[in-house]
């Protein structure tokens, strides 16, 4: 399991070399051979599974493979950057530096030969250690000793089950669902992250007296990841047909067993529990065994994956919550104090430890077992301070998490381990995370799909598997922020460090980091000092992220010179706290950079050094005071996301100038003007999905809005005026806005009746946000056909018209510090079929009274009305 990342790396580097061979002039043959050899090494990795844990030589061999893959990546990327830089030189520079370039190319060929010789030795060593060259099944990717892991997991679950506490509300809900309801065969699923107590809750319900009395036949089978359909069926039969001779059943074919089980259950009101299902197809393979005879029979499943829960039980999937603190304390006390009272001197420490377990029963049991019989406060204090590490070190929990990690698709594994970069309990902005994944090179292009869309699928995959928690949601339903449970984070930290994939540094110059050489660094200490003392160790680093929350130090020219030691850096994120004084000329040496985020509040001029970074995909300069960007910005030809602040002016592209080969997707915020209008007209911004416009002058040229119709992929539009006047309103035209718009945000933009109706004609608009202005809300018949959320902040509403059949999909109304001088159209609002949430903070005027009147009707529909003072 541990070298899944190595397999991913080797495969990815091999594919990359073969795809880019035409760009590697002068060393094409050597590179092509190297790519083939690297891809073939994956066979060795697959065949070595099961041998490496008990064999030091095999472990050494795996380490060699890891090192050779990293070295190959370094050599080839270094060569490609140098070759591309040489290609971009003018003729004189090429002539003057041609000899040096030939020597460099010769040196690269020599390094590739050395790597190839190392791979040859790996082949020879693999024969000696009994690892086959064919590597077995291409699609197999088994985990290390599964039977041992499952046995330990099941034992720990029994320990939790004996001391089950809490969850009465959930148990009662599920029990009621199982006993009552429709006469047809029905389903209940319990899903959630590993260690949450899904099996324990299911077992409690299964053994409940009411359940035993209600069902004439009950069966339970543990499925697991590597299930065997025949053995699953036999497992059920042994519990529902105990009188049958097991030896006779073993002689039956799979189809005969299915038929026998089905015939047996036809005459019963049965409950069958399928515990720990991993794959939807498992249910498809056995579903025919369960007849529906109208006897109120039930199927209950437990799974860690939402997609499995939804597949089996589309309407009855129940996500298990964490234990409340009181429940966790009860479980902990039972295990540690055995019915006795917690000693006063340990009370606060014990409570802190329970909180560190974050409501996870399995973690609580591990910590309780660690402290049982211990009364020394110092031991308890050390345990509290190292709680997450102690829990993660437990072999049983490690095995549980390893099974989930191993089951991930290979391409998703580096995305999961990347969570090791973020501090404990850190809320990760989802879109920023996706851009980081793309910048790191984790996301490979598939057909015509955007890499960002593929990355979003990966994030949803991790959420569905309960490995990542969606914390907040955008108004369009997408994930806004996410986080990872502390236990899973510890697992990621351990695995990422073992693979040299990523390490977190909390000290400027830690004594134990001299030989680790990780590929990525999460710096959680004084960043400028860290760069100063560790520049010599950055040569192989691909990523530096800053999470320094307490430093007042600044990044200056000297620090940039040190950063240049990592000339193959792909990601450089100085975060939002560390201030960058300037971006000097030295920054232009970071030619491999894909992602750059700087916090430079004193920066007013766009750094010319950045225009040389042709590989840059994301440039985040939101914390700057730029007034304009130079003509040379078009040289950043791979730019996909550009974040600026305020009304930044763009240069006008001359009519005879060639269009830059941009695939820009996000541009925010820029000033309205001829520069942006020309880019729209000439199709340079044809791929933009998110656009922010901001003016800072009464003379702003908003005529550019007419060019918006050229942006046929535009999904999100923000229009902001920093001067709070009506210059925008006077020029609005319904034909300007592309039909693709899903979200519109308007700030300091006055909306009279006519202007509001313009947005009502957008066929795909789902979210409308209005801020810091006054408005008339006019919902004409058939307007806003897809609108789901209307959000207003600091808005004065003078009138609200809501005609029949307007906004038929409206779900949420959100008001923050809004003043209504008109009555709410309560009757029309109540008639909206999907309206579920009305929320207001600091309501003024007639808004609060109107909400109080409509509240009973909305609650009767199953919705909520929340008024916050």
Image (cartoon, helix red, strand yellow):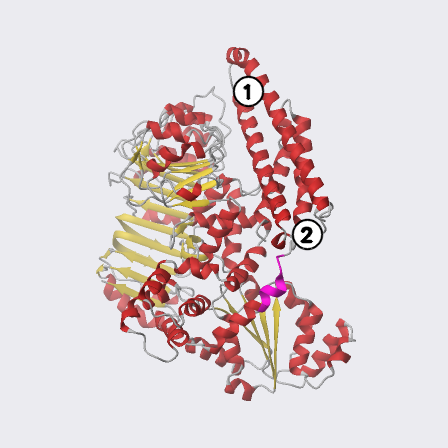
Q: For the view shown, which residue lies furthest in the left direction?
A: 845
Question: For numbered disc 2, what is the local secondary structure?
Answer: loop
Q: Which is nearer the N-term, disc 1 or disc 2?
A: 1
Question: For numbered disc 1, what is the local secondary structure?
Answer: helix
758 up-or-down from 34: above or below: below
Q: Which residue is drawn at 28% across and 39% down?
A: 721
Q: For mark 1, what is the residue? A: 87
Q: What is the crowding at mark 1: few (fewer than 14 residues within 10 Å), some, or many (at least 20)? A: few
390 up-or-down from 538: above or below: below
Q: Which dot marks residue 633? A: none
Q: Which dot marks residue 139? A: 2
Percent coordinates x, y for residue 677 in the rendering: 40, 31
Magenta stretch contains residue 150 = yes
Q: Residue at x 29, y 33 (%)?
A: 625
Percent coordinates x, y for residue 550 in the rendering: 28, 45
User: Which range is magenta?
Assistant: 143-151
Q: Is the magenta stretch mostly helix, strand or loop?
A: helix
Q: Between residue 373 and residue 516, name the one nearer to us.
A: 373
State left or right for residue 249 relative to residue 512. Answer: right
């Amino acid at each position: 399991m541990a070298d899944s990342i190595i397999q991913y790396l080797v495969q990815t580097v091999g594919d990359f070399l073969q795809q880019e061979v035409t760009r590697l002039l002068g060393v094409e043959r050597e590179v092509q051979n190297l790519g083939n050899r690297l891809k073939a090494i994956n066979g060795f990795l697959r065949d070595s599974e099961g041998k490496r844990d008990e064999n030091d030589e095999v472990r050494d061999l795996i380490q060699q493979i890891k090192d050779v893959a990293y070295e190959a990546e370094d050599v080839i990327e270094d060569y490609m950057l140098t070759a591309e830089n040489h290609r971009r030189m003018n003729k004189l520079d090429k002539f003057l530096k041609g000899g040096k370039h030939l020597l460099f190319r010769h040196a690269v060929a020599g390094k590739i030969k050395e790597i190839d010789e190392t791979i040859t030795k790996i082949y020879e060593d693999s024969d000696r250690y009994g690892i086959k060259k064919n590597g077995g099944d291409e699609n197999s990717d088994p985990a290390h000793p599964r039977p041992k892991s499952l046995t330990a997991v099941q034992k720990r679950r029994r320990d939790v089950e004996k001391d089950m506490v809490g969850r009465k509300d959930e148990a009662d809900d599920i029990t009621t669902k199982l006993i009552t309801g429709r006469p047809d065969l029905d389903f209940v699923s319990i899903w959630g992250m590993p260690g949450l107590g899904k099996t324990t809750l299911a077992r409690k319900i299964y053994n409940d007296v009411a359940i035993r009395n209600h069902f004439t036949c009950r069966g339970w089978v543990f499925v697991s990841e590597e299930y065997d359909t025949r053995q699953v069926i036999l497992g059920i039969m042994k519990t529902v047909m105990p009188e049958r001779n097991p030896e006779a059943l073993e002689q039956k074919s799979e189809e005969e067993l299915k038929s026998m089980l089905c015939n047996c259950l036809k005459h019963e009101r049965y409950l069958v529990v399928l515990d720990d299902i991993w794959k939807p197809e498992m249910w498809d393979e056995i579903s025919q065994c369960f007849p529906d005879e109208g006897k109120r029979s039930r199927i209950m499943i437990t799974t860690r994956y939402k997609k499995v829960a939804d597949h089996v039980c589309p309407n009855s999937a129940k996500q298990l919550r964490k234990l409340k603190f009181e429940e966790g304390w009860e479980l902990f006390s039972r295990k540690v104090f055995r019915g006795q009272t917690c000693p006063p001197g340990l009370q606060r420490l014990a409570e802190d430890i329970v909180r560190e377990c974050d409501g996870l029963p399995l973690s609580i049991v591990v910590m309780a077992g660690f402290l049982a019989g211990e009364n020394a406060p110092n031991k308890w204090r050390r345990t509290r301070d190292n709680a997450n590490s102690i829990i993660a070190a437990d072999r049983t929990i490690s095995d549980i998490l390893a099974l989930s990690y191993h089951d991930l698709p290979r391409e998703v594994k580096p995305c999961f381990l990347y969570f090791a970069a973020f501090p404990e309990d850190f809320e990760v902005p989802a879109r920023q995370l996706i851009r980081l994944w793309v910048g790191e090179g984790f996301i490979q292009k598939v057909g015509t799909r955007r890499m960002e869309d593929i990355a979003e699928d990966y994030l949803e995959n991790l959420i569905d598997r309960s490995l990542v928690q969606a914390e907040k949601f955008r108004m369009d339903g997408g994930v806004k922020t996410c986080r990872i449970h502390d236990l899973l984070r510890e697992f990621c930290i351990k695995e990422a460090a073992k693979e040299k994939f990523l390490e977190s540094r909390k000290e400027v110059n830690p004594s134990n980091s001299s030989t680790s050489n990780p590929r990525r660094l999460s710096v959680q200490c004084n960043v400028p000092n860290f760069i100063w003392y560790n520049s010599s160790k950055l040569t192989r680093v691909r990523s530096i992220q800053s999470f320094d929350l307490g430093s007042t130090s600044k990044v200056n020219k000297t620090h940039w010179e040190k950063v240049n030691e990592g000339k193959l850096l792909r990601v450089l994120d100085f975060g939002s706290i560390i201030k960058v004084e300037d971006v000097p000329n030295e920054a232009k040496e970071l030619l491999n950079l894909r992602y750059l985020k700087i916090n430079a509040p004193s920066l007013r001029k766009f750094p010319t050094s950045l225009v040389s970074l042709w590989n840059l995909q994301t440039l985040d300069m939101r914390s700057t005071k730029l007034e304009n960007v130079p003509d040379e910005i078009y040289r950043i030809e791979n730019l996909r996301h550009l974040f600026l602040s305020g009304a930044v002016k763009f240069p006008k592209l001359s009519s005879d100038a060639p269009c830059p080969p941009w695939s820009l997707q996000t541009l925010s915020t820029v000033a309205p003007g001829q520069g942006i209008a020309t880019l729209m007209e000439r199709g340079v911004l044809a791929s933009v999905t998110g656009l922010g416009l901001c003016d800072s002058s009464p003379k702003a040229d908003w005529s550019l809005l007419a060019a918006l119709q050229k942006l046929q992929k535009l999904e999100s539009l923000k229009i902001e005026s920093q001067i709070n006047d009506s210059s925008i309103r006077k020029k609005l035209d319904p034909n300007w806005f592309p039909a693709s718009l899903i979200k519109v945000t308007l700030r300091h933009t006055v909306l009279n009746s006519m202007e509001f109706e313009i947005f009502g004609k957008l066929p795909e608009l789902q979210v409308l946000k209005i801020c810091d202005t006054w408005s008339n809300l006019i919902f004409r018949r058939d307007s806003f056909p897809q609108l789901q959320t209307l959000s207003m902040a600091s808005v004065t509403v003078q009138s609200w018209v809501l005609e029949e059949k307007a906004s038929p999909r409206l779900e949420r109304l959100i008001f923050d510090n809004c003043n209504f001088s008109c009555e709410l159209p309560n009757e029309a609002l109540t008639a909206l079929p999907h309206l579920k949430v009305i929320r207001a903070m600091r309501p003024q005027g007639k808004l609060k009274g109107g909400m109080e009147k409509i509240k009973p009707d909305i609650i009767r529909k199953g919705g909520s009305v929340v008024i916050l003072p």
